[in-house]
Amino acid sequence: MPDLRSPGARTPREVLARHHRAMLDKSADDLADLYAVDAVHEFPFTSPGFPARFEGREAVRAGYRAAWGGPARVEEIEQIAIHDTAGPGVVVAEQVVRGSLPATGTCFSVPGLLVLHVHDGLLTRVRDYMDGAGVTGARP
């Protein structure tokens, strides 16, 4: 399989690690900076009140800034497994995001899969299969 990265570009696993760090830090800027300008982030199992997709880096930045402006706090991302694929630059992550709503003391757990497409060290497409019921339970 050919390596489609430019010299010095991040691997898909490195991008995934930075994606998780941005989530833990609630940093929409750090997260958005992982995306190509024209990237697409899709939520195939979206819940009412949540977008089905973000088109472009700045939509990712604005969408996560709005989502993370709320009271929920991500405290842990349990990495169940990372699957390298035959597709160049594609990695699949099984994970559980755990956090809380500090104002109420409510805890939440959101299992999901992330399918990341990385080219030249940047995310070009993300399919975020998270448990919509878990997300809804994380709302105040």
Image (cartoon, grey):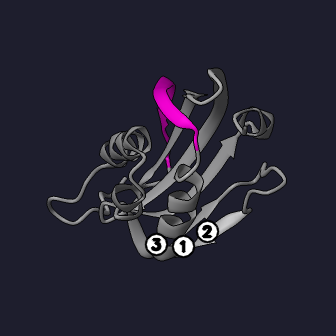
The tag on residue 19 is none
Real-space CA distance between mark 3 and mark 2, rounded to the nearest whole angstrom? 8 Å
Query: Can residue 91 be seen?
Result: yes
Q: Earlier in the sequence, mark 2 or mark 1?
A: 2
Residue 62, image x, y percentages: 52, 69
Classified by dominant secondary structure, the portion drawn in magenta counts as strand
Query: Would residue 73 be counted in the magenta stretch?
Result: yes
Residue type pointed to by label 2: Phe
Placement of 49 over or under 6, stated as above or below:
above
User: Type of residue at label 3?
Assistant: Arg
Residue annotated with mark 3:
57
Q: Secondary structure at mark 2?
A: strand
Question: Image height check: is 4 above or below 109?
Answer: below
Q: Work out whether 30 lies above or below 76.
A: below
Q: Which disc, if any, is residue 59?
A: 1
Q: Is residue 38 magenta?
A: no
Residue at which label 2 appears: 54
Q: Residue at x 47, y 66 (%)?
A: 61
